[in-house]
Amino acid sequence: MLYDTNRFQLRGDFVARMAEVIAANQTARPGGVVFIGDSLTQFMDLKKFFPEYPSAYNCGLAGTTSDMLLHFIDQGVLKCRPSTVFLMVGTNDLGNTTMASP
């Protein structure tokens, strides 16, 4: 079967990353900063680029589209009870990565 993000065909590495985020969020301190988005977020070194946020949580999911991220918002953001959310999405919504691409 061809990969079709509109059908939410989650692959093993994506599911593993989701589990990592969910596990890390279990101990998140309320009032922190959640960084959520695609691979640009997941692979960002938060300690290097945002040292002023000691309670920063990287909830990036490489390969995710905006629509897919909506289905993860509870576990990926709300469970952390953040004061601030940094959102980086849209890159995977363009081109040949999704059938819904403009």
Image (cartoon, rainbow, N blue to C red):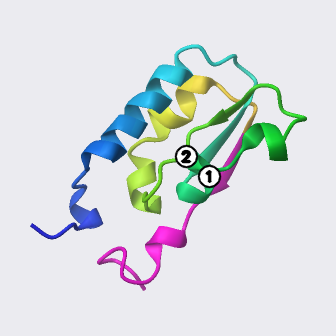
Considering the image in quadrants, where does the C terminus appear? Answer: bottom left
Q: Which residue is mark 2?
A: 60
Given residues 58 and 81, the one toward you in this image is 58
| Residue 85 position (above or below residue 22) | below
Vertical order, 21 against 73 (above or below): above
Q: Which residue is outermost to the left?
A: 1
Residue 101 included in the magenta stretch of the image: yes
- Residue at screen point 43% across, 59% down: 63
Front-lying residue, 1 or 26:
1
Point out residue 26 in the picture as x, y percentages from the top left corner. 52, 16
User: In the rendered view, would you say 28 is above or below 16?
Assistant: above
Q: Residues within 10 Å of mark 1 (few under 14, many from 20)?
A: many
Q: Quadrant of the N terminus?
A: bottom left
State the SS at label 2.
loop
Figure quadrant of residue 81: top right
Residue located 47% across and 54% down the image: 62
Tell me if residue 4 is in the magenta stretch: no
Secondary structure under the numbered disc 1 in the rendered image: helix
Q: Residues within 10 Å of mark 2 (few under 14, many from 20)?
A: many
Q: At label 2, which amino acid type do we have?
A: Gly
Residue 82 in the image: state x and y as whole percent.
69, 29
Which kind of residue does numbered mark 1 sit on?
Answer: Thr
Across and down, in percent, residue 27 comes to 59, 13
Of residues 61 and 101, the one drawn nearer to the viewer in this rendering:
61
Q: Which residues are magenta?
A: 85-102
Mark 1 and mark 2 lie on one chain; the one further toward the N terminus is 1
Circle 1 residue: 41
Question: Real-space Cα distance between discs 1 and 2?
Answer: 5 Å
C-beta proximity under 8 Å, tags 1 and 2: yes
Identify the residue shown where x is 47% and y is 61%: 66
